[in-house]
């Protein structure tokens, strides 16, 4: 049982100071990881040989240690901060009651009991007897009886009873805080050693939940904006103290990392931790699934295979992202930023080559049918090639290219794939569902960069990705971009380029010949749009519009700039040294006069 003297003498400020030390260490660990990834590993990757390979392996282990230390140290800092704040609150309650007791001249016992004097009656007769009031906590009936005794015991008894109750609540609060944080901090103890295992990363995920549960009444995930605009998200974040920001990052990395409008460096720090924890979790699940593989002829083998392939695909996709992040700052590439990550649905991954907050030119590449976490490698390669070629076109200005897998894309374009008679890629629903997320992301880039005039932005949609872009931009949707590029588009849900909100002079289209890319013609009846109906002509006279064939961006009547290309297939628009890649990059760099038109 915590005593009055112990709580009164406690030094919450010492815990807060120690939390600051752990927070500083977490910052150092993050800086160290960047140095290891971008300096030490970069030098080794430029060399070859068995010794170099072995050294690179050890450097990778060191980088993992730094990231793990950053995460765990942040959790310790958050727990100590919570302990300091909650214990300080209990101590303030205790001291306020002690001060009031001193004013009345009531002695206070170590257990929070309050002694009060008798009150003599008139002319020395019987008055109110003295006594000792004890703290509550004896249950509803016991507390009620104590209150009755106080009421019939006179004014001193009533006052002393109230003080004893307050002192008792402060002591019980302190005891609960002490026990809760002792358990929490004990859970953060890790085994010594250099190698960070998948089990340790999985345990880090449990630690996040443990510390979050301990900070009752302080910081919670419910405090993080949900459904707010990117500008509102940024205002919330900027209104926090640096310590509060560090605590939210440590406790709720997934929620913070998903907030559009926050700086790229903040989102990257949050999402890298999420990636590590999710990789450990899925890898562990995959190992467990493999360990219980049924016999080939077993009726449950098909279900087992689907579960196995799903988990294996997620692991493969996360490894692709990890490799891309590790390559940041090497081979002539800039830093890489993980702006969003989740394993929900078909997976979410938003990866930026270069910092979009600081770039003169930013491009957002939206992949199409079949895009999902397990296939993310190819889309990451496209974003990287766009960056390299755009840097050439930008002539010294800075560039950031972003691969935006922020939605569940349709997974089949042909009948009977995955058992579907009607291909999912013919549905407009995926695009309409994805549109708000793309609008929020683009608005968030604009907010984080400093406003619409901070830089030049281009949104590129490939295949069904262009349909998503159209859904986000049409009907005054307000997609925050300067230029729109549709590549191999099956339709953008609008009949004309002018309906996309950026002006038809800033809409660009690229499609290979009909035999090389069948998607535009195959998709137009489902995702294209025509201009049939009643129009208002000259002098207000109505007329019948008979444009019955839906337009797609590669049609001349759509009104986009049709760019020349040398693609020989639906997925060949980002081949290295291709005309297709160069023309997209010239739009990204704002070099419109250099774009070759078809």
Image (cartoon, rainbow, N blue to C red):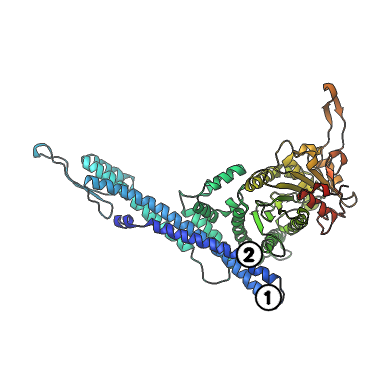
Side (left or right) of 448 relative to 432:
left
Looking at the image, the residue that sits furthest to the front is 396
SS class, disc 1:
helix
Q: Which mark is residue 459?
A: none
Q: Position of residue 35 (x, y in %)?
A: 61, 65
Q: Is residue 13 visible?
A: yes
Residue at the spot of label 2:
288
Left/right placement of residue 18 relative to residue 450 reads left
> Where does label 1 land, which residue?
52
Q: Nearer the viewer, residue 376 or 363?
A: 363
Residue 595 at x, y percent in the picture:
83, 49
- Give the quadrant of residue 330: bottom right
Task: Say if residue 342 shows up in the picture.
Answer: no
Q: Nearer the viewer, residue 253 or 31?
A: 31
Report the quarter where the N terminus lies. bottom left
Q: Is 212 rendered above or below residue 467?
A: below
Element type where label 2 sits in the image: helix
Label 1: how many residues lie within 10 Å, few (<14), some (14-19) or many (20+)? some
In-front residue for pair 251/51: 51
Whole-angstrom CA distance, mark 1 to mark 2, is 34 Å
Dots 1, 2 in contact, CB < 8 A: no
**Coordinates of residue 479 in the picture (x, y in percent):** 71, 41
Residue at the (65%, 72%) spot, across then down: 57
- Specify whether 458 is left or right of 540: left
Tell whether 104 sits left or right of 399.
Answer: left
Residue 552, quarter of picture: top right
The image position of residue 172, as x and y in percent, is: 35, 52
* Residue at figure coordinates x 38%, y 50% from the top left: 89
User: Is disc 2 surrounded by few (<14), some (14 to 19) or many (20+) residues within 10 Å?
Assistant: few
Marks 1 and 2, the one that precedes in the sequence: 1
């Amino acid at each position: 049982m915590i005593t009055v003297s112990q709580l009164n003498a406690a030094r919450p400020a010492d815990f807060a100071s120690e939390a600051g030390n752990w927070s500083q260490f977490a910052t150092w660990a993050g800086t160290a990881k960047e140095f290891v990834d971008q300096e030490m590993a970069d030098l080794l990757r430029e060399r070859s040989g068995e010794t170099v390979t072995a050294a690179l392996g050890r450097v990778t282990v060191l980088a993992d240690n730094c990231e793990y230390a950053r995460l765990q140290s942040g959790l310790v800092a958050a727990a100590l901060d919570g302990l300091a704040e909650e214990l300080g609150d209990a101590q303030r309650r205790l001291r306020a009651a002690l001060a009031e007791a001193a004013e009345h001249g009531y002695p206070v016992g170590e257990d929070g009991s309050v002694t009060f004097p008798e009150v003599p009656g008139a002319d020395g007769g019987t008055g109110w007897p003295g006594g000792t009031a004890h703290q509550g906590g004896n249950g509803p009936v016991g507390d009620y009886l104590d209150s009755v005794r106080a009421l019939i015991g006179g004014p001193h008894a009533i006052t002393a009873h109230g003080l004893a109750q307050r002192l008792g609540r402060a002591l019980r609060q302190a005891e609960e805080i002490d026990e809760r944080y002792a358990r929490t901090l004990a859970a953060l103890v890790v085994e010594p050693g250099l190698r960070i295992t998948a089990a340790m990363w999985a345990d880090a995920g449990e630690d996040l939940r443990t510390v979050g549960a301990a900070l009752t009444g302080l910081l919670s995930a419910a405090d993080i904006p949900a459904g707010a605009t990117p500008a509102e998200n940024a205002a919330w974040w900027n209104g926090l103290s640096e310590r509060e920001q560090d605590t939210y990052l440590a406790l709720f990395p997934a929620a913070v990392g998903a907030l559009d409008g926050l700086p790229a460096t903040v989102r990257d720090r949050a999402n890298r931790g999420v990636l590590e924890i999710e990789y450990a979790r899925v890898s562990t699940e995959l190992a467990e699934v493999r360990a219980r593989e049924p016999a080939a002829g077993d009726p449950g083998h098909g279900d087992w295979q689907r579960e196995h392939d799903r988990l294996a695909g997620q692991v493969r996709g996360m490894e692709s992202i990890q490799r891309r992040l590790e390559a940041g700052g090497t081979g002539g590439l800039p830093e890489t930023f993980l702006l969003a990550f989740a394993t929900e649905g078909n997976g979410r991954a938003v990866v930026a080559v270069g910092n979009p907050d600081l770039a003169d030119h930013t491009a957002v590449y939206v992949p199409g049918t079949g895009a999902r976490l397990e296939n993310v490698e190819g889309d990451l390669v496209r974003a990287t090639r766009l960056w390299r070629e755009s840097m050439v076109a930008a002539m010294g200005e800075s560039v950031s290219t972003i691969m935006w897998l922020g939605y569940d894309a349709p997974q089949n374009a042909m009948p009977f794939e995955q058992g579907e008679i009607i291909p999912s890629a013919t549905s407009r629903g995926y695009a309409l569902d994805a549109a708000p997320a793309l609008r929020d992301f683009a608005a968030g880039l604009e907010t984080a960069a400093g406003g619409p005039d901070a830089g030049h932005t281009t949104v590129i949609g490939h295949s069904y990705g262009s349909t998503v872009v159209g859904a986000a931009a049409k009907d005054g949707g307000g997609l925050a971009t300067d230029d729109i590029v549709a590549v191999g588009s099956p339709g953008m849900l609008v009949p004309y380029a002018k309906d996309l909100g950026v002006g038809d002079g800033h809409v660009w289209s690229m499609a290979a010949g009909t035999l090389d890319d069948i998607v535009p013609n195959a998709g137009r009846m489902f995702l294209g749009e025509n201009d049939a109906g009643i129009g208002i002509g000259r002098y207000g006279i109505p007329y019948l519009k008979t444009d019955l064939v839906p337009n797609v961006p590669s049609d001349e009547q759509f009104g986009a700039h049709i760019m020349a290309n040398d693609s020989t297939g639906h997925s060949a628009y980002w081949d290295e040294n291709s005309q297709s890649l160069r023309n997209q990059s010239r739009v990204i760099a704002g070099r419109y006069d250099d774009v070759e038109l078809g």
